[in-house]
Amino acid sequence: MKKIAIIIISIVFFSSCTELEVTPTSFVTKENFFKTQEDAVSSVTSVYASLNIDPTDQSLFGRNLYFLTDMGSDYAAAGASAINPNVRAISGLSYDANTDRIRVAWRQIYNGINRANIAINNIPKVTGDETVKTRLINEAKFIRALLYFHAVRLWGGVPLVLTEPKSIAIQDLKTNRATVAEVYNQIILDLKDAESLPAVNDKGRATAGAAKGLLAKVYLTRKDWSNAILKAKEVINGGYGYDLFANFGDVFDKTKKNGKEHIFSIQFEPNQSGTSSGSTFNACFAGFVQTEPADIVSDVALFYTIYAANDTRRDVTFAKQLLNPNTGLNYVFPKPLFRKYLDLANLSGGSTVNFPILRYADILLTLAEASNELNGPSTEAYEAINKVRRRAFGKDINTADAVIDLAGLSASQLREAIYEERKKEFVQEGQRWFDLVRWGRLVTEVKKVAAKAAVSERNNLYPIPQSEIDINPEGLPQNPGY
């Protein structure tokens, strides 16, 4: 009897390719599904949905990945309200191959990769406009590249799966670890294809600018400074309309979603089904009660107090007091709380603030870093970082400011300044752990947090989940230290 592969597909049809609906509603068989252009659109919708929807758990970018990329760094720690021992293990760097948050992140990443493979493999078969079909395939390739970019940085060489499963037999599903270089080669191939996407900044969809921006980040991670500069400048000079918001707080204003600074963001909407907490971080806020939240600033002296009093990022990122919109009462907190994603109009549910994957400030700091590493403290590097600094202090980003602007630094001094600027700019944006690892500074920086003294070189990679090794012990050797 012929086996029929079952896949999760969102059956949501829309009149164009520009509006992204992200609620999967049913299961369908692949053999009976891929026939029309509408089927192709729906398959790619399900690829996007893998990023922000998981009916069984906290979604990948809604909260789960945050545990690894931020709580696993020096930024955040588990507060009194964090009762999950697996979360507390990540906070204290005592996790192992059985820690469930790591296993769930692996599952969610490969779920998205599998959905992307299904779309990429089957869309060529459907009847429809070839231009639309090519666009949909390249959107799926962008998501596949994004997911593999996270996977290779979290675990090192991982299974490189590029086709859909042919059966549900365990033996057919086993795939050995690829090398780090092989995974990056595929990421770059997918993103180069995605560079042909339209330039228009559609709501939540991958675009040419997003592909180029992610390529710049990939090259930066690989220390390929020349290509990182090339791609960052293509984003900056490509006519895509990207720029910094005048006010840092606008980045996290839900009324300004998908604005000029947002190159690619994970979309969150009110009452979004299939996810337990929306855009991460209402859990970082205990509500208007004097209770320590689930996620706290790991060390106030290392983070909150490093901002100058007139650096506008501090009071967007953290809150020492807040006015309750329901009662009119002002609450003063014993310690600063994270507030970047706080949705005061939706405190009882998930935040409806989008989660930024790539924004224009990141491209500027990518250019500054790569340019400094390749050419030293150049005019190009200074101007890129100084634009970010001017905005932080409420200045016009295009006007030189003798007080705010950096100048006259050595290459090593500018490197340190760029590191510090990223630390202040991207709190809770899924960047810190990756930055510390690629800089070779994870152990040095995390050790400064007393509660994270258990950090060691093993923490530069996460363990392959034991459940995966049990299935394929020869093909999935464990990372060192686990």
Image (cartoon, grey):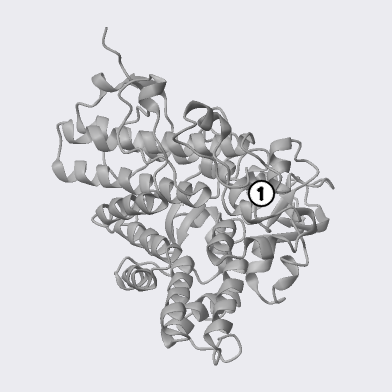
The residue drawn where x is 58% and y is 83% is 413
In the displayed structure, does residue 221 sit left or right of residue 448?
left
Picture coordinates of residue 164, whole percent (x, y)? 31, 30
- Is residue 232 in view from this perspective? yes
The residue drawn where x is 46% and y is 85% is 376
Picture coordinates of residue 81, whole percent (x, y)? 78, 41
In the displayed structure, does residue 301 sit left or right of residue 364?
right
In the displayed structure, does residue 79 sit left or right of residue 187?
right
The residue drawn where x is 56% and y is 50% is 461
Direction front: furthest residue = 474
Quarter residue 367 falls in: bottom left
Q: Residues within 10 Å of mark 1 (few under 14, many from 20)?
A: some
Query: Label 1, on which residue?
Result: 344
Picture coordinates of residue 337, whole percent (x, y)? 74, 55
Q: Of residues 279 and 177, which is closer to you in this image?
A: 177
Identify the secondary structure beneath mark 1.
Answer: helix
- Is residue 325 in view from this perspective? no
Is 420 above or below relative to 437?
Answer: below
Q: Amino acid at mark 1?
A: Leu
Picture mark count: 1
Q: Of residues 336 and 141, which is closer to you in this image?
A: 141
Q: If the image is split into quadrants, where does the C terminus sit?
A: top right
Q: Of residues 370 and 303, which is closer to you in this image?
A: 370
Picture coordinates of residue 236, whole percent (x, y)? 36, 71
In the displayed structure, does residue 412 sit left or right of residue 6?
right
